[in-house]
Amino acid sequence: MKIAILPGDGIGTEIVEQAVRVLKVLDLAFESETALVGGAAYEAHGHPLPEGTLKLAQAADAILFGAVGDWKYDKLERALRPEQAILGLRKQLGLFANFRPALCYEQLTHASSLKPELVAGLDILIIRELTGDIYFGQPRGRRTAVDGHFPGAEEAFDTMRYSRPEIERIAHVAFQAARKRSKKVTSVDKANVLETFQFWKDVVTEVHAAHYQDVELQHMYVDNAAMQLVKAPKAFDVVFTGNMFGDILSDEAAMLTGSIGMLPSASLDKNGKGLYEPSHGSAPDIAGKGVANPLATILSAAMMLRYSLNQPAAADRIESAVKAVLSAGLRTPDIWSEGTTKVGTREMGDAVVAAITGKTITTKT
Ligand code: NAD
């Protein structure tokens, strides 16, 4: 097993360090190699996704990714901004299926901004299409308007588009994932306004009718889905949607679980090779302070073992260790509540390692 480790920027380096420590105590035979990506790669090599980093990612069986970005790069031309590295990796590696489980651990029901009874036991899976939609559609750019409300004015435009095969392949992923859960899929669209999403809805309906009649399919407009996610989140099981809606809804779902610092993700290609990363960004506001929650990254490493490296027992060990640490009352500041023990990034990593190796979880305040 060869794992490419790409920590990135901001808290990326701090949280990936903890996930790697956790992987190392599992006694698995794996090789790993680390490379720069994002702003760190731009500083060293003048590009956020240097050739060497891309080659390493292509050659690996799986990629563990931290996060990229910093406000200081906002003035760079778009192609050189750190965020282009993650978009480039998704595109170059064909990582079209993004899995974001949103699980509310029983110990964290009070860390959610919703009432505990609304989120207790929450277990939903958001499946987001990752290589199409308005994030990749061409043409895009700036120009002088020739029509619209202000002809002659400066304007910007992007292109929302999905092809039939793109929708079909993500629909298969969603329905197959639902078969391993409670066989219920909510496809989120904006078919009432957007041609692209009327097409999405039509194709999803066809795939369902032809192959997945055993799975319950519901269609929902994205504005309603955003509302239902905070009104009655447990009514969902698999929520499946396009790139932009999935980006927004998965952050919303993150807050149901207590903190975005708890939410792992997997981005898979058609063969199951994947890039694993927390759902959050590089959090420049807390970078370098040693307070970032590493659990989303540690849980992403567990997803990597399960989905790409065929090590489900090791994945279970990580997930059980995370539950044990939460049961012991340890909390980084983002999930802290009265009566629990506040710890930093490294101490949280220490505790997960201790839980895996069977040592007593010690708490320091
Ligand atoms: P963010 O996810 O970095 O942070 C949002 C808020 O959540 C911040 O208050 C942050 O402190 C908090 N937060 C995030 N992760 C946390 C953790 N593990 N523990 C505790 N608190 C945590 O989003 P943002 O502030 O909008 O973006 C910051 C940078 O990250 C930008 O440059 C953005 O483009 C980039 N970004 C990168 C990715 C990626 O690498 N895949 C994803 C999203 C944003």
Image (cartoon, grey):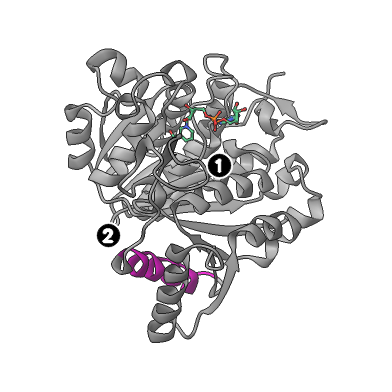
Residue under pointer 2: 270
Judged by its main secondary structure, the magenta piece is: helix
Task: Using the image, tell me which numbered label, if any, was put on residue 80.
Answer: none
Image quarter of the C terminus: top right
Residue under pointer 1: 321
Label 2, secondary structure: give it. loop
Image quarter of the N terminus: top left
Q: State which quadrant residue 218 falls in.
A: bottom right
From the viewer's side, name the closer residue of 236 and 3.
236
User: Does the magenta segment cover residue 96?
Assistant: no
Q: Percent from the top left, x then y, of residue 338? A: 82, 30
Q: State which quadrant residue 271 falls in.
A: bottom left
Q: Percent from the top left, x then y, of residue 335? A: 69, 34
Image-based side of 326 in relation to 130, left or right:
right
Q: Percent from the top left, x then y, of residue 221? A: 60, 64
Q: Callout 2: few (<14), some (14-19), or many (20+) C-alpha neighbours within 10 Å?
A: some
Query: Residue at position x 45%, y 65% from top?
Result: 195
Q: Percent from the top left, x then y, of residue 321? A: 55, 42
Image-based side of 108 in relation to 282, left or right:
right
Query: Residue at position x 33%, y 67% from top?
Result: 169
Q: Which residues are magenta?
A: 166-181
Image-based side of 72 in relation to 43, left or right:
right
